Amino acid sequence: MARIAIIGAGFAGHTAALYLGDALGAGHEITVVNRLEEFSYVPSWVWVGVGRMDLRKTRFPLRPVYDEFGVRFVHGRATEVHTDERFVVVEDGDEKGGVTRVDYDYLLIATGPKLDFEGTKGLGPEAGFSESICTGPHAERARDHYLEEVARMKKGERRRFVVGTGHPGATCQGAAFEYITNIHKDLVRRGVRAQADLLWLSNEQALGDFGVHGVRVRRKGRILSSEEFIEAAFREYGIGWRVKTGVLGLEEDKIHWEDFDGRSGETLYDFSMLIPRFLGQPLAFLDKEGRDVAAEVVAPTGLVKVDAKYGLAYEELSRDPDAWPSVYQNPAHPEIFAAGIAFAPPGPISVPHVTPNGTSISAAPPRTGMVSGIIGRVVALNLIDLVTTGQMTHSERMTEMYAACIASMGDSLWDGSAAVIMIYPVVPDYRRYPNDEGRDLFVTHMEMGLAGAWMKRMIQTTFMHKLRGRPGWRLIPE
């Protein structure tokens, strides 16, 4: 009997658990460890953050799903991984506060990120001055403060909203983009848009970069860039922007930043939602003698090292599609895998930048949503291979991977909108597509309109069906 442990039940870990339970649950021990007892559909938290969706509609309990798939569920926080003896220590999530030992033959780390609010002075909803939509409680708090600002605008006050990234090395610009455009649409609906100044503040090289080196598509005989695409939307919505900017700190009413040229400045605000840098969740890695062996497993960021080529200069990395991992397996401990945000990428997708002052302002590679689900599936299929045949047969690099992003720009199915972006591959492959900036322009596509709003809502419905493991779940792609 094989023992497979999964730490984390987000898109990557939960997807892997469904495939593993479906294939191996009857005769093997599959265990999922998660800090929360519910799965959370994170993409819909942009709607929670403006009061357009109840948080409860984005969640469902995990245990009943796992019971159906023969998967053991441990509610708690993983704190230690003992690499020689192959077990995980879990601080139980119930009120008793006990400790559970989870033994494994194979381990998948799919924890999602540590939200590094501490990495930027004054950032974050707990100890800082900014809002967040990165957790359910954060999204509800952002909603409450947002509605307070709406109430002030209804009394005739003018308010300043700043949304974007809160660290020079942050990622997940897509979520922030969705939030600022949903704020715009909601303020229009409430009749107070004229009382608001909206500013996009980001570490991107250009508008629409999104940490993926931008997107280019062919349209009506010409090349259209994501920079033009997003700029047109911002101009239509009256949203200002400042890119090539790394946030260094916040005060109660101002944001301090440095730009690509090394110039310092500040931006005043009344309400801000800034995405923090993502790091690996804190886990101790110990050998049988109790010695720290974290350097064998994780990078300095706390993200798990996998079968990537680390340490390449950007110019070399960007021209080597094989530098990106294919099976997401740790070289020093081949029984350990990582998926989603938890794996350490070999470097950025977008061009990194260092200011004359030595500040690195570089968007980290996005690895959320669809990308996380795909990697979770690839790892699960390989674990099934290892248990049944001893040989892995599945692989998928981000230089081979499709990804679709549907960025909501208002939730209404009657007058809402969404930006639909299809990218292939996620990481440019200049070897296969040397004349098109590394991507297949036949597949890569951008569109904006009401149909995207319907697609966004449809995808939430179908994914909540899939992730509950309901009939036909395997037919719905990650």
Image (tube, rainbow, N blue to C red):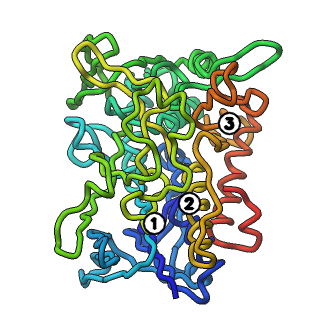
Residue 220 left/right relative to 414:
right
Q: Secondary structure at mark 1?
A: strand
x and y percentages locating residue 325 in the rendered image: 51, 48
Badge 1 vs badge 2, beta-carbon distance below 8 Å: yes
Measure how far apart labels 2 and 3 are at the Cα level: 19 Å
State whether residue 221 appears in this view.
yes
Query: Residue, x 46% and y 62% (percent of image)?
Result: 337
User: Residue at label 1?
Assistant: 108
Measure how far apart labels 1 and 3 are at the Cα level: 26 Å
Q: Secondary structure at mark 3?
A: loop
**Who is closer to the viewer here, 266 or 463?**
463
**If you read the primary sequence from the N terminus, does the residue marked by circle 2 or circle 3 appear first?**
2
Measure how far apart labels 1 and 2 are at the Cα level: 9 Å
Crowd tier of the residue under label 2, counting other residues whose Cα lies within 10 Å: few below 14, some 14–19, many 20 or above = many
- In the picture, residue 28 is in which quadrant? bottom right
User: Residue at label 2?
Assistant: 376
x and y percentages locating residue 76 in the rendered image: 34, 74
Q: Identify residue type, mark 1.
A: Leu
State whether residue 190 appears in this view.
no
Q: Is residue 186 above or below residue 143?
A: above
Query: Residue, x 26% and y 58% (percent of image)?
Result: 294
Query: Residue, x 27% and y 81% (percent of image)?
Result: 95
- In the picture, residue 258 is in which quadrant? top left
**If you read the primary sequence from the N terminus, does the residue marked by circle 1 or circle 3 appear first?**
1
User: Residue at label 3?
Assistant: 424
Q: Identify residue type, mark 2.
A: Gly
**Who is closer to the viewer here, 131 or 431?**
431
Residue 296 left/right relative to 342:
left
**If you read the primary sequence from the N terminus, does the residue marked by circle 1 or circle 2 appear first?**
1
Q: Secondary structure at mark 2?
A: helix
Crowd tier of the residue under label 3, counting other residues whose Cα lies within 10 Å: few below 14, some 14–19, many 20 or above = many
